[in-house]
Structures are given as C-alpha cells and as structure tokens.
Image: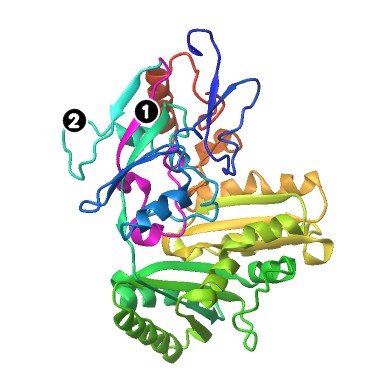
Amino acid sequence: YCTQHGLAVVPQGGNTGLVGGGVPVYDEVVISTAALNAVESVDADSGCVVAGAGVVLQALDEELAKHNLMVPLDLGAKGSCHIGGNVSTNAGGLRYLRYGSLHGSVLGLEVALADGTLLDLLSTCRKDNTGYDLKQLFIGAEGTLGIVTRVALQAAPRPSSVQAAWIGIQTFEDVRRALRLARRHLGETLSAFEFVDRASLDVVLEGQHASMRLHDPLPDNPTPFHALVEVSGSNEAHDTEKLEHFLEAASEEGIAVDGTVASGGRQLAELWAIREGISEALARRGAPVYKYDVSIPLSCWYDIVTDMRARLSEAGYNDSSGVRVVGYGHMGDANMHLNISSLEVDDRIGDLIEPWVYEWVSSRGGSISAEHGLGQMKASAIGYSKHPEAVRLMAQIKDVLDPSGTLNPYKVLPSS
C-alpha cells in the first residue's frame, strides 16, 4: 500500500538504537513490529528457535532458559530491544567474543519486501548450500532492503557455571597482554573480556542512584585500566581451576596489580552492573554525550581516547571545564566505545570531534561503526569505512529491492 501511494516507511522495533535507524526523518509512516511477539517454536534437540520480530530479547532468552538454551547475544538494552531489530542492525554485544555475529547465528528469516511480497527464507537448517544466501542481505541492512518479520535463530547451550574476575592493570600494553593470556589460559571457557578505563569507572561510581550501591571492586589499588573477564561452562570446578590459573599467571607476569573473583549471585551481578551502567551514568551526568562505537586494531586501540583527550584539552576542554572523555568496550573483539560527556551544550566541542574521529579511525584501518549501525546519524560517513565501489554496489542492491525508495529512507547510504 505504502509503495503504491508513494509513502515512505520506517520499521521500528524497541527503538533502542543509538544512531536514529528506527526514527523518522520527515513524515515517514512508522511500522511497528511490536505485535509480532510470539515465540513460535523451540527445538531442544537442534537448538533452533523461531520467533516473531517483535519478541523482546530478554523474553526470548527467558523462554530458551526453559530448555537449557540461551540467545547467543546479550545487550544492555535486552529488556527493551526486539530480536528483529537486533537482526536488522546485526547487533554485537557482550557475547560476541564467544558466539560471533548474528550473520553466523541466524538460520533463516521472513522478510516483507517493498512491493509487499513476504519473502520466505525461514530455513531452520544449520547447513543449506543451495544458491545465494539471501538472508545475509537483510542482516545489518537496518530495514532499508526489507522488514524482518520472523527469525530462525541458532540458540546456544546455557552454561550452568558463570564466573568472572575484575582485574586492575597499570598500562594499556599490559591490558593487551592480559587478553592474550586469557585466550591462552581460558580457551573455550572465555565468554567475555570487557575493558573499562578509570574515567568510565569513576563516572559510574559518582553518578549512580543511591539504590544501586555499587562499589569500586579494587578500592585499595586504584589503577588506570580494568578488565572484566568472564568464563562460563558446564563444569564449575574445571572453570574455577582455569580462572585461578589465569589470575595466578597474570599476577606472576606482572600484568595484574590486583583482582577479585565473583562466582555467581550478587557479586557477579554487581561487576556486570558497573560495566553495563557506564552509558546510563554518562547520560545522568549531563547532556550532550557524544557517542562513538568504533572498531580499531588493538595495537592502537586506546590511542583514540588519549588523542581525543589531548585534542580537546588543547582547546581548553577537560575535566576541570566539565568535559570528560571515557573509553570502554568489548576489547575481546576490538570494539571501543568512545564517549565524550559535557556538562554544557557547546557546538565547538562537536566541531572538534567530527569529522576528526572518523578520519582517525579510517587512517588506522578501523570501522566507524562496530555494532550500532549507521542509521541516519552516520549514513553520510560511510565513506570513511567503505570504498566508493562498495558503496555504489550497495546502492545498486537497494535500487533492485526498493526501486521507489520506500524502505527507511535517509538511512545507511548517503543518498538513500
């Protein structure tokens, strides 16, 4: 109907995105997937789950828990985001290190095309080598090629044992050494390696609600850098032994200054609350918050934070003037969250940040969007991460599937 009448549409799930992908730019019609909220089937043998695009991620995970399975995806917004939106943005999150991207976990899709055709790609087979793997076109396309309506997903076995260590580290080079050591010692049990710098930790502890009662995990040995290392598996004694050996090695090799271990329950939840609470704490600190979700080679991963601090400081913007630069993220997959928080609105800060931050990332072979997508906020910057030939091919694919430009205009591609 919308295509026939020249009406552009914006598919919208939980509306938790950070780049405006599910928000109209002008007068587009919003198509909500919230009513597609049924978990249709769970195959406990194969681990395949079929669900409507509007199923909330946390609700899907709770349903899978009844079968000792879990979604191979975990996000801070899991209580609000929809699985269809997760697929449409190729969301990454906290389990990426262990389970990889949704390009590997999605078995099949049902997609509504611009002409109204309901394209059935809803295979539940893990192995299907017949023709082009068309579903991959729609994973990460942010609703610009079609609207995801149903998802077949490969769930993962739910671990019966989850433990984590919070370690304090003096230098970033030692953080890199810690990651290499974790991969070597923890192997298949390593499920997360999250990085938190001191500025990020301070923001959480200073800006938390009184009811949260979060504490510095290592109050006696403050360090510039921290790592949250999680292991999960099916044998608690085995996992504990591997984690202890890792911590002993980290201490003996002079990597870890201090550390603490949480074995489930409240203590584990508190460590994750610190990591997941950074974004919210920055928002409570004041507006605006300039957020950048980038992939950078680990050899220069934290340099973007120090270089950004130096650039802003030279212009008179630093902690004493109410501007704070923090770095945290999924170091296990080289995904840095660079955030700049200001207590006051100042357009000059934004001018100092962009396009400098994109140029910095591009010059080091990184990506300007690691997991949040491009949406409307970063569509014009795609050239910093993709060559012109690739962008032209994307535009040609868009023209084939949506020749009238009905689906989510002004998103992903500069001219869409």
Residue 111 tag number: 1
Q: Nearer the viewer, residue 304 or 182?
A: 182
Residue named by callout 2: 131
Is residue 178 visible in the rendered image? The answer is yes
Q: Name the amino acid, label 2.
A: Gly
Q: Earlier in the sequence, mark 1 or mark 2?
A: 1
Residue neighbourhood size for the residue with mark 2, other residues' Cα within 10 Å, grouped as few (<14), some (14–19), many (≥20): few
Residue neighbourhood size for the residue with mark 1, other residues' Cα within 10 Å, grouped as few (<14), some (14–19), many (≥20): many
Instruction: Please provide percent x and percent y for residue 221.
Output: 62, 87
The residue that appears at 34% across and 70% down in the rendered structure is 160
Start-end of magenta stretch? 86-115
Instruction: Please provide percent x and percent y for residue 351.
Output: 73, 44
Q: Is residue 345 left or right of residue 87?
A: right
Q: Is residue 29 magenta?
A: no
Q: Name the amino acid, label 1.
A: Val
Instruction: Please provide percent x and percent y for residue 410.
Output: 57, 26
Q: Quarter of the image holding residue 309?
A: bottom right
The residue that appears at 65% across and 85% down in the rendered structure is 219
